[in-house]
Image (tube, rainbow, N blue to C red):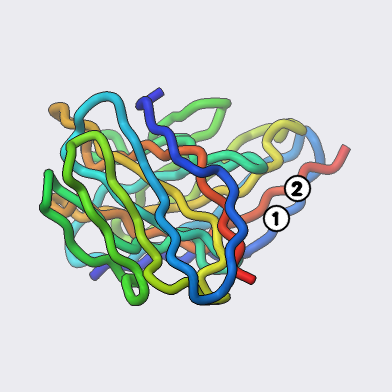
Amino acid sequence: DAGITQSPRHKVTETGTPVTLRCHQTENHRYMYWYRQDPGHGLRLIHYSYGVKDTDKGEVSDGYSVSRSKTEDFLLTLESATSSQTSVYFCAITPDRPLSYNEQFFGPGTRLTVL
Amino acid sequence: AQSVTQLGSHVSVSEGALVLLRCNYSSSVPPYLFWYVQYPNQGLQLLLKYTTGATLVKGINGFEAEFKKSETSFHLTKPSAHMSDAADDFCAVSEVGDYKLSFGAGTTVTVRA
């Protein structure tokens, strides 16, 4: 158990509203990731972080922003939610230890529905 | 950039039968390779991984996978399926020095009694 929690676990919102999802870890690992999961696409990387205030884009970053002001928290924001952003969102971390080999541990997910 | 192809979005097997899930990757150098399992309404859990060394790797729940560099493949097998193996399975690849994973589209495994 890598001590990863996500909040909220479920959210229903309306098109055009801002939404922020939170990922919290208890072990101060540097690398954190946000993915979205959609049928037929597996998991696709939205953004990732390699330290406080150090973030970079993934393959599907349009419409999303992130922030990391503390090691333990990685926030994903949808500035103006659209129906195409209805998805399940997963947070992940890579452990800061020798021989982790880029292995990632995942949170329980947040199911977001945009009406 | 690496990519992952999982052949077959759905696999149905009888309980006790062999489970075979196919994964091919494209990468310019031998990568790190992973299989993850996802049970309904849960996050992803690591089944097994290949990093270096022995090309046949064993994981949890009786699964194993073989890295074949010449075929750029990392197929997942289990000799005898159990009802609890019903899940979605994802193959993923990462290049050495790159902290990102690329995932395949996933394979849904159904086990028939």
Q: Nearer the viewer, residue B73 or A70?
A: A70
The residue under label 2 is B110
Q: Where does the image place residue B83, in percent across and percent down from the top left? A: 77, 33
Work out whether residue A16 or residue B94 is closer to the camera in this orientation and state it: A16
Residue A66 percent across, percent down from the top left: 27, 58
User: Circle 2 sits in a helix, a strand or a loop, which is it?
Assistant: strand
Image height check: is A65 above or below A31? below
Q: Is residue A75 left or right of residue B1?
A: right
Residue labelled with disc 1: B11
Q: Amino acid at mark 2?
A: Thr
Q: CA distance from mark 1 to mark 2?
A: 6 Å
Q: Report the quarter where the C terminus of chain A lies.
A: bottom right
Residue B57 location (% of width, % of height): 39, 34
* Up/down of B17 relative to A1, above or below: below
Circles 1 and 2 in contact, beta carbons < 8 Å: yes
Q: Is residue A89 visible?
A: yes
Q: Give the vertical position of B63 relative to B72 (above or below).
A: above
**Crowdedness near tag 2: few (<14), some (14–19) or many (≥20) residues, C-alpha within 10 Å:** many
Question: Disc 1: which chain?
Answer: B
